[in-house]
Image: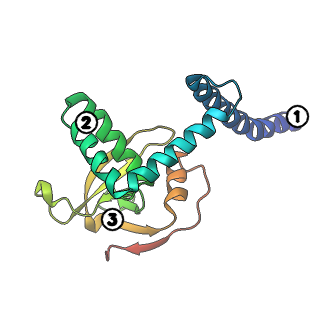
Amino acid sequence: MNRLLAYFLRGLVLTVPTALTAYVGYRAFVAIDSWLGLAIPGVGFLATVALITVVGFLGSNLISLTLVTWFENALNKLPLVRLVYASTKDLINAFVGEKRRFNKPVLVAMTPDGAMRGLGFITQESFTSMDVNDSVVVYFPQSYAFAGWTFVVPSSRVTRLDVGSSDFMAFVVSGGVTDMPAPRMRGNEE
């Protein structure tokens, strides 16, 4: 009976993530297709990817940059729209844009003796704009959530890790369950 239960649990581990990923992907395809009124599954998704790529190409053009700047300035004048637009843009840029912010994984000593440590990402190398010297801004993502905490931490309590950002984020967001290649600690020299 224990062996049968073990097989069942192993089957859950193998099928649930695959089924959930397939379901979410399917729902995304169906939603995009329905928004565009297309009957052929997946064509709406491909059209959306193509459109985003074309917008990216046009947005990189010197003439288009003027229009993009004008458009963003117009949006930034509208209070609620500015909040949504600016925070969404900053979030996307933090992961995939030119101003990536989640590319500096660190280990932070949370207690004076360093026995308790937090895993995070340096998002700003200095915080002198708020008159806080010798400190960095560290974002601590929460496990299994699209949320986190942001702390200003003395640089002396931060140990930089030489590990891939995506591996590190997966490790933190999974609550430490996902395997991560062993990081090399780089100290506080930077």
Q: How many marks?
A: 3
Q: Which residue is mark 2?
A: 75
SS label for mark 3 = strand
Between the residue at mark 2 and the residue at mark 1, the CA separation in whole angstroms equals: 59 Å
Percent from the top left, x then y, of residue 24? 63, 32
Q: Is residue 71 above or below residue 34?
A: below
Residue position marked by numbered label 3 in the rendering: 158
Residue 115 spot, x, y in % from top left: 39, 59
Q: Residue at x 40, y 39 (%)?
A: 147
Q: Position of residue 144 (x, y in %)?
A: 51, 39
Point out the tag, 1 or 3, that comes first from the N-terminus: 1
Residue 126 placement: quadrant: bottom left
Residue that protrudes farthest toward the front in the picture: 63
Identify the amino acid type marked 2: Leu
Side (left or right) of 60 relative to 190: right
Tell me the residue that label 1 is attached to.
4
Q: Earlier in the sequence, mark 2 or mark 3?
A: 2
- Give the vertical position of 107 relative to 39 (above or below): below
Residue shown at 19% from the left, 66% from the top: 134
Say what amino acid the circle numbered 1 marks. Leu
Q: SS class of the residue under badge 1?
A: helix
